[in-house]
Image: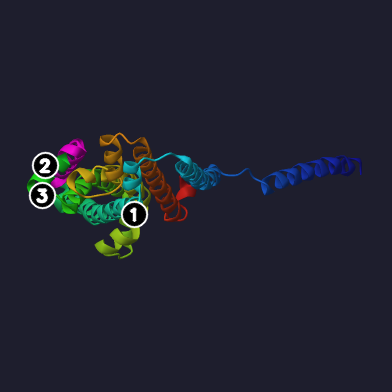
Amino acid sequence: MSTASGRRPDGDHDNGLVHDDDEEQEAPPPSPAATRRRVTWQKLTFLPAVLVAVLLATWLWFRQADLDTLSENALSHGQVSKALWQHVQLTVISTFFVLIIAIPLGVLLTRRMFRKVTPVAMALANIGQATPAIGLLALLVIWLGIGRRSALIGIIVYAILPVLSNTIAGLKANDPTLLEAARGIGMSPLGVLTRVELPLAVPLILAGVRTALVLNVGTAALATFGGGGGLGVLITTGITSQRMPVLVLGSILTVALALLVDWLASLAELLLRPRGLGAAT
């Protein structure tokens, strides 16, 4: 009896400890992946508020600014909306062609038949981005003439490198054992590419697309020197005529558009990331 009674408190004490451990396991601390995702969403909601505040402040400043005749002519009759729309068109069209060129080319350069050509293709892409944008645009204008075509080709050549290099890096970073397992269950090479390789490479590819988008917005401001239009028209008009309001408006709209594009790209990067990948990293 004394032995049994002596064991009973120890058993109760052990059970209490186990019960406390169970309670602690029921409320684990948040994982680092969840914390990163929550912080990311907070950043995504912060930037639009800043953009709205900046644009509102700019609009209020222009309402009380004393504009002369030259500034009013440069900003009236829909000139601002026309330049902004041209800038958006240049960015969207150039990014579309960058994607349909760089991503398939990156896939081809990771295949066994074309791996020897990879250094040559990367060297050409590096030359395209290493060349000063204004110099590249000038050469294209001499070759193709003044117009939107020259501006678009210059923007495309300048933005191919980040998408191409990230596509190649993303596909090369895939775990070979996963690819062998996919082939082992009977997947075709196309099936392995579309259902295993590309989904795993999506985060790196999207990061390259995000970089290319911001580059395209900035480079499109130089399209005005080739007759391509865009917000660069306002910037050059403000510089050449020494009209600060015109220059400020063109610059603020260009910066705001670049930040907006970067925000949209980061949102797409978060939403299109394969499920489970964030938890793994």
Q: Nearer the viewer, mark 3 or mark 2?
A: 3
Of helix, strand and loop, which one carries label 2?
Answer: helix
Mark 3 vs 2, N-terminal side: 2
Give the CA separation, mark 1 to mark 2. Answer: 33 Å
Give the CA separation, mark 1 to mark 3. Answer: 28 Å
Q: Where residue 145 is drawn, which disc sits there? A: 3
Q: Which residue is mark 1?
A: 77
Q: Amino acid at mark 1?
A: His
Span of residues in magenta: 117-135
Q: How many marks?
A: 3
Q: Is residue 174 visible?
A: no
Q: Where residue 139 is drawn, which disc sits there? A: 2
Q: Amino acid at mark 3?
A: Gly
Examine the structure image and report whether residue 118 is included in the region drawn in magenta. yes
Mark 1 vs 3, N-terminal side: 1
Q: Is residue 221 left or right of residue 252?
A: left
Mark 1 vs 2, N-terminal side: 1
Tell me where residue 250 appears, x and y as whole percent: 35, 42
Name above or below for residue 198 compared with residue 215: below
Q: Nearer the viewer, residue 219 or 67?
A: 67
Tell me where residue 192 appears, x and y as whole percent: 30, 60
Going 12% across and 45% down the picture, which residue do you hit?
A: 140
